[in-house]
Image (cartoon, rainbow, N blue to C red):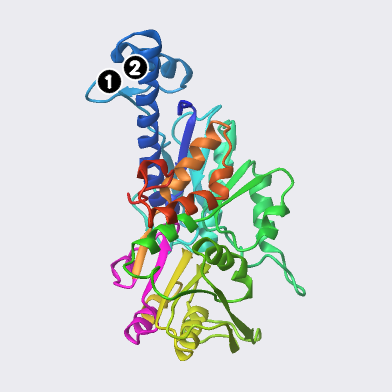
Amino acid sequence: MRYFHPANLAIIACPGGDGFAESVIKHLHKKYRQSRKQIIEELSKRYNITHENAALHIDIVNRTIARTTASKSGDGNNVHRSFRVPVKFTMFPNGEIKSEILESIRGKDVYIFQDVENSYPVPFYGGQVRKLSINDHIMTTFVTIDAVRQAGAERITLVIPNYPYARQHKAKGREGLSASRIGKIFESLGVDHIITLDIHSRDIINAFNKMRLENLHASYQIIQTLSKIDGVLNDDFVVVSPDTGAVDRNKFYANALKKPLALLYKERDYSKVSKDATQSNISQVRLLGNVKDKTVFMADDMLGTGATLIKGMEILKENGARKIVCAISLPLFSGNAISHFDEAYRKGLFFRIIGTNAVYQEEVLNREWYINVSISRLFAHVISHLHQNQSISSFLDNTNIINRLLSQTQTPEPQNELPFHNEEE
């Protein structure tokens, strides 16, 4: 096994991305400890030395390479690397934001975390706590990237699971391609990589000159969660695409689960804007497929006001669907969406919604109908591989491990062989 050497790995969390960064760091620490333990075992056997001497040699190398001093843990047998770099974020009275890096990151491989959809109050220097808009979060990201570049980072990777302005990826008239423009600004500021989750359109990936965008998927974690819901996968089960734009995503689930695929075809009145779940711009919905007396599974990349999803649930119920389970990679729950889903759940429109921790949430976590799935370990794996310049292809196309997971439901296998097993914190 290759040693995960974290000496030059640095993580910076913007105020909005602090929670997700901390959960990923926990997995990075665990991965580092496991890697270190294994290399100590190998060195001890190869050179016939004690574990203590092997650990001492590793620590000497770490201290030689690292630009900061590592500190020993209480047992004296482990060197603990703090990946987190302290940053002072200041918001001035006029709304300007300043990021100040508080330790040297010259020559480091820096990963900047941000959650632009975090709608909860976040802290700033001086005791301020402010609720930020998506544009405030983006501006915070800009000034942080600039500060990191000015501080001499070797490589900058932006970890932004919910890519901003992703729905503005095509122009039908006199409108901007904002998804592309945001990315090009990141690129112009010096970002080398972006790591994101289930980006709304693959067109965005092709919009940059040199910057790479790694688009991860939560399909393994979602299918793992589905397999734990009693009786769901054993029922008469059908996958339904909530619209034509989500066909490829739901076709993937249908193929993986070996279940039939249906489609909700929606006609929209684009002169109207969906302000909440009660005001949809959908003018007509047609179901292509059979859902009568079946358990329905729908997957989508993001949930905003929820108007479209609730309308789709109503149509499915009218057509005889028995139980509806939805999976959302980016559960935004904009505005008063949670209260509308509370009402829809009371009416029996759906059974469960599976969402990820890519978007920081508090209120929805205590709902009976909501299942929160952690993708932190997935991001930790990808960051450690990128830091070591290793391939991440197995994380971008996770078909093989999904097949292995599903085979476990029939014939149990050793669980530690699955790279994403046990995603809980």
Judged from the image, the secondary structure of the residue bearing numbered disc 2 is: helix
Residue lying farthest to the top in this orientation: 48
| Image spot of residue 229 (x, y percent) | 33, 66
* C-alpha gap between disc 2 and disc 1: 7 Å
The amino acid type found where label 1 is placed reads Asn
Q: Which residue is mark 1?
A: 77
Which residue sits at x=39%, y=15%?
43
Q: Is residue 73 magenta?
A: no
**Rendered residue at 65%/45% (across/down):** 212
Q: Residues within 10 Å of mark 1 (few under 14, many from 20)?
A: some
Using the image, determine if residue 421 lies above or below residue 38: below
Residue underneath mark 2: 55
Tell me residue 59's x, y (percent): 37, 17
Q: Looking at the rendering, which quadrant does residue 317 occupy? A: bottom left
In the rendered image, residue 366 lying in the magenta stretch gets the answer yes
| Mark positioned earlier in the residue sequence (2 or 1) | 2
Farthest residue toward the right?
173
Q: 318 or 26, which is in the foreground?
A: 318
Q: Which sits in the foreground, 335 or 324? A: 324
The number of numbered discs placed on residues in the rendered structure image is 2
Which secondary structure, mark 1?
Answer: loop
| Kind of residue at badge 2 | Ala
The reply to whether callout 2 and callout 1 are in contact (CB within 8 Å) is yes
Q: Position of residue 216 (x, y in %)?
A: 54, 52
